[in-house]
């Protein structure tokens, strides 16, 4: 049975790049960075980067014997 998908929301920082276009990163996901020629493209690209980051992070954590759990907080 496939795992239930959940919707996650992350704050991202979008900055103009010196070379043109935009760089975007997710402060809460160390090393999760992407870019795009426009704001819209950069924001779409970071969605893919987040997906890859989350998939690889869980695999690495489990390979090291870590337990992966979820907690919920309300603000």
Image (spheres, helix red, strand yellow):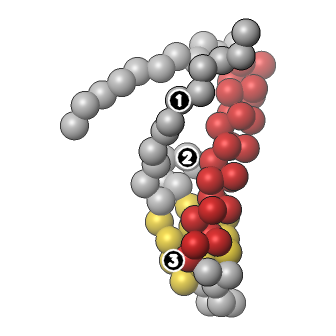
Q: Is residue 14 above or below residue 74?
A: below
Q: Measured from the top left, where is residue 10 in percent x and y?
A: 46, 48
Q: Residue at x 50, y 36 (%)?
A: 7
**Residue at the image position 47 percent from the left and 66 percent from the top:** 13
Of the residues under marks 1 and 2, which one precedes in the sequence?
A: 1
Which residue is rendered at x = 61% and y = 81% of the image?
38
Residue receiving disc 2: 29
Q: Nearer the viewer, residue 20 or 44?
A: 44
For marks 1 and 3, give the one nearer the viewer.
Answer: 1
**Distance of mark 3 from mark 2, alpha carbons?**
17 Å
Q: As drawn, is 34 to the left or to the right of 15?
A: right
| Nearer mark to the viewer, of 1 and 2 | 1
Q: Residues within 10 Å of mark 2 (few under 14, many from 20)?
A: some
- Tell me if 62 is positioned left or right of 50 in this view: right
- Could you tell me residue 3's position as x and y percent? 66, 17
Mark 3 highlights which residue?
15
* Quadrant housing the N terminus: top right
How far apart are labels 1 and 2 at the CA level?
17 Å
Place of residue 50 in the rendered image (x, y in percent of width and height, measured from the top left)? 63, 48
Q: Nearer the viewer, residue 5 or 74?
A: 5
- Can the viewer see residue 36? yes
Q: Which mark is residue 32?
A: none
Q: Which residue is mark 1?
A: 6
Q: Quadrant of the C terminus?
A: top left
Residue extending farthest left: 75
Badge 1 or badge 3: first in the primary sequence: 1
Kindly give the residue lying farthest to the bottom in the view shown: 19
């Amino acid at each position: 049975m496939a795992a239930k998908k959940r919707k996650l929301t992350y704050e991202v920082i979008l900055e103009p790049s010196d070379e043109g276009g935009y760089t975007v990163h997710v402060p809460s996901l160390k090393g999760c960075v992407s870019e795009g020629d426009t704001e819209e493209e950069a924001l779409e690209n970071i969605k893919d980067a987040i997906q890859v980051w989350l998939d690889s992070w869980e695999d690495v954590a489990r390979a090291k014997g870590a337990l992966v759990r979820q907690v919920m907080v309300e603000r």
